[in-house]
Image (cartoon, helix red, strand yellow):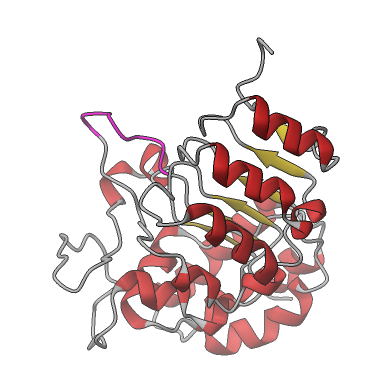
């Protein structure tokens, strides 16, 4: 039995996933196309529980960002588009292009033999149909103010790209800590997000300076009742928003609402 099938038919684990992606990467380096492997392994991996994260590797992320399509990306269920990558792979990390005139040093092979289309790298990733099985998305930006910060990996100035992503309906966990500070009408956008993501259960909105009106609107949103965890530290909460979450039956769901002294 090929090593790859032994891994996917064994006990599901993140360690097994890491071994699998390393094995597939070795096959790519040897000149093999990974499309047939993705087709063969996909049904096996579909039997794994969603709780076992199958994270899109950093280099696969950059290849997808360059090409707009990557067959092996269909095997993943978790996407990290955060500067957290830089803590593990600083020399390999760079932000994705987010505007037409953005330019970064290319650090890997992602553009080898590729003629990119007119979209930005950020758009290619969010629009990739191979990512429709994503259940966890982390776009947190946590290193602002650090003089060595490489900057955010993605920066959504508007929410529409996220709203239209092929994975939004099945998304269960979303971390947008310090990633929404440029959104206009953030409260209304978050309500629309909850409507488009009916499977969402865990949402981290920390450090976005949302303010009381947005928090009160969020508490009043019927779709917020689907959440099992809502992190709101650093959003200017006050007595009115705390009462609103309590009245909505969500105080047991909300975490770190800056209310230790109330």
Residue 76: x and y in percent read 61, 68
Vertical placement of 153 versus 100: above or below? Answer: above
Q: Position of residue 235 (x, y in %)?
A: 52, 34
Query: Above or below — where is 45 with respect to 220?
Result: below
Location of residue 205 in the rendering, given as x and y in whole percent from the top left corner? 56, 43
Which of the 4 quarters of the picture holds residue 16? bottom right
Seen at 39% across and 64% down, the residue is 158
Q: Is residue 209 above or below residue 185?
A: above
Task: Residue 39: name its quadrant.
Answer: bottom right
Extent of the magenta region: 141-148
Residues 229 and 82: in front is 229
Residue 142 magenta-highlighted = yes
Q: Residue at x 35, y 82 (%)?
A: 67
Nearest the viewer among 126 and 248 is 248
Picture quarter containing residue 197? bottom right
Q: Residue furthest top?
A: 261
In the rendered view of the protein, which quadrant contains the C terminus?
Answer: top right
Asked whether residue 242 appears in the rendered view, the answer is yes
| Of 251 and 98, the residue lying toward us | 251
- The residue shown at (61%, 42%) is 215
Q: Dominant secondary structure of the magenta stretch?
A: loop
């Amino acid at each position: 039995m090929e090593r790859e099938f032994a891994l996917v038919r064994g006990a599901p684990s993140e360690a097994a996933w890491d071994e699998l992606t390393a094995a597939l990467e070795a096959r790519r380096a040897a000149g093999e196309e990974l499309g047939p492997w993705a087709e063969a392994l996909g049904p096996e991996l579909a039997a794994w529980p969603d709780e076992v994260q199958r994270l899109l590797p950093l280099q696969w992320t950059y290849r997808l960002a360059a090409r707009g399509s990557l067959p092996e990306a269909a095997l993943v269920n978790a996407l990290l588009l955060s500067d957290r990558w830089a803590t593990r792979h600083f020399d390999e990390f760079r932000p994705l292009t987010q505007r037409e005139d953005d330019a970064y040093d290319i650090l890997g092979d992602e553009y080898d033999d590729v003629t990119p289309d007119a979209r930005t790298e950020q758009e290619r990733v969010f629009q990739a149909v191979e990512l429709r099985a994503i259940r966890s998305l982390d776009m947190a930006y946590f290193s602002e103010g650090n003089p060595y910060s490489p900057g955010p990996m993605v920066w959504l100035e508007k929410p529409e790209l996220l709203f239209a992503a092929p994975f939004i309906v099945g998304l269960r966990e979303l971390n947008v800590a310090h990633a929404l500070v440029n959104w206009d009408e953030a409260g209304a956008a978050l309500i629309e997000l909850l409507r488009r993501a009916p499977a969402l259960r865990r949402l981290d909105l920390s450090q976005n300076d949302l303010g009381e009106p947005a928090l009160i609107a969020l508490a009043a949103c019927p779709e917020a009742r689907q959440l099992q965890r809502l992190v709101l530290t650093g959003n200017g909460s006050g007595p009115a928003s705390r009462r609103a979450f309590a009245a909505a039956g969500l105080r047991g769901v909300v975490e770190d609402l800056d209310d230790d002294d109330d």
